[in-house]
Image: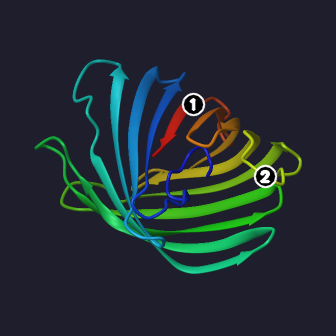
Amino acid sequence: MGLRSFVALPVEKQGSVVRLAFEHAEDIGTDILTTSVAFGISSKQTLLLGIPYRFSPSAGDRQGDVSVLYRHTVWQQDSFSGTNRLGLLGGIIIPTEDDRDSAAQAGFVFTHVKNRHEIDIDALYQVGSNNRSDSGRYDMSWQYRLSPTEYPDWGIKPELNSVLELNGRWSEGNSTTHQVTVGLQRIHQKWVAEGGVVKDVISGSEWRYILSLRFHF
């Protein structure tokens, strides 16, 4: 999966993935740790949970709202060299403070894998209740396997992937922010270390840095 989205990751039945993603926004001086969990209900159904926590600045409510998403793979086509998958997303945003409102969210995720290339495309729209504004996002990620150039005949070797993404973020009353993300992924059988740099496409003033660890159980 890409760096900026957690929805594309396949999880086997009864399997689980825990991800800790730290993001530093240089222009506004924020540090946020997002804890995400994916649980495989079946080979085609996954429950996704995410909750952010802001380390800095320390003023105000630092605990973010809980995101709950259900992903159902409605189409899958496997081949010797890769796979194609289409999944539908649906869920809610649960506020952690009384002065914040909930939201319903829905979207899709598409994955194409062939040889050393993987492309993940997802979009998610959130409809806020009461005083919560509507919002949306999209992510288009291309991952290229730098190493190994070919898989071994037996066993699993660690992988090194390059990542290039185009990301968009929108909230009601504001224009869409388009971003480019460049990074690397080191993939082992039970854990993944990844990181990248995010740049605002239009204004050119926003820099963000991401460091993430994933653990597969």
124 vs 189, nearest the viewer: 189
Residue ID at (10%, 44%): 98
In the image, residue 100 sits, relative to residue 103, either above or below, namely above
Total count of labels: 2
Judged left or right of residue 81, residue 60 is: left
Q: What residue is pinned by disc 2?
A: 154
Amino acid type, mark 2: Trp
176 vs 86, nearest the viewer: 86
The answer to which image quadrant residue 129 occupies is: bottom left
In the image, residue 207 sits, relative to residue 163, either above or below, namely above
Mark 2, secondary structure of its residue = loop
Give coordinates of residue 147: x percent, y percent: 83, 41
Amino acid type, mark 1: Ile
Residue ID at (27%, 60%): 103
Separation of residues labelled 2 and 1 (CA atoms) = 33 Å
In the image, residue 118 sits, relative to residue 25, either above or below, namely below
114 vs 30, nearest the viewer: 114
Judged left or right of residue 158, residue 50 is: left
Q: What residue is pinned by disc 1?
A: 210
Give coordinates of residue 163: x percent, y percent: 73, 43
Single out the residue that lies furthest toward the front.
Answer: 154
Marks 1 and 2: in contact by CB < 8 Å?
no
142 vs 139, nearest the viewer: 142
Q: Earlier in the sequence, mark 2 or mark 1?
A: 2
Give coordinates of residue 196: x percent, y percent: 65, 32
In the image, residue 196 sits, relative to residue 49, either above or below, namely above
Judged left or right of residue 156, residue 85 is: left
